[in-house]
Image: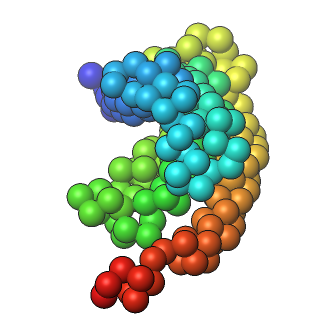
Amino acid sequence: MDTSTRQDVGLLLFRLGVGGTLAAHGTQKLFGWFGGGGVEGTSAGMEAMGFLPPRTSAVMAGLGETAGGLALAVGLATPVGGAAAASTMAAAGAVHHPAGFFATEGGFEYTGVLALAGTAVAISGPGRFSLDRLTGDRLNRPWMSAAALTVLGGASAFVVARRNRAVAAAAPAAVLDAPSDAASGG
């Protein structure tokens, strides 16, 4: 097997693993598959994490993971699929960032790796064994990577900033609602 074929097989396996993982997580959010909460359960989680509006956030996260993951897995519209995966995982990573890096401590390790994987495939392209290649790379032009990463990365930054403002605004109210030491007998 020549070097080019080895790289294309490696990209195919990488896309299938990362894309399949993302798509499975997205279907948990959208449909409740694989033990997920569906849109209703995910909406409640989004609200608890400060994402507003929660239902829209749940649907967008589910679509970003499902559609982005499927696009990566089959290698179709790869720049957009990779950017969708990366931007969705960047927003998820914002929730985990305060806990540090390692996932064992609740950190952003997992979401960060998936975001980097989506970005890398958006930039590199899907390789020879892909639907993009079968369609003449009509949806995989070099300029599309930069455009998709810029637009969807900007959208992710907006969502994270809005979430951070909501969390910061809720923090003083949570302190005011907490029982004082005197009232709790402490």
Residue in the foreground of this view, choosing between 33 and 141:
33
**Horizontal side of residue 72 vs 18, given as left or right:** right
Residue at the top extreme, as displayed: 134
Q: Is residue 120 visible?
A: no
For the point 32% across and 84% down, the residue is 185
Residue farthest to the left, as pictured: 104
User: How was the colour assigned to the protein in this rendering?
Assistant: rainbow
**Residue 25, can we see it?**
yes
Vertical comparison of 147 with 101: above or below: above
Above or below residue 147? Residue 18 is above
Instruction: Say whether residue 174 is left or right of residue 135.
Output: left
**Quadrant housing the N terminus:** top left
Q: Residue at x 53, y 54 (%)?
A: 49
117 left or right, relative to 186? right
Q: Is residue 176 above or below residue 31?
A: below
Q: Position of residue 156 (x, y in %)?
A: 66, 51
Identify which residue is drawn at 53% across, 24% down: 30
Judge by depth and name the residue closer to the eye, 140 or 88. Answer: 88
Percent coordinates x, y for residue 115 in the rendering:
49, 48
* Image quarter (top left, top right, bottom left or bottom right) of the C terminus: bottom left
- Residue 22 sits in quarter: top left
Looking at the rendered structure, the number of numbered marks drawn on it comes to 0
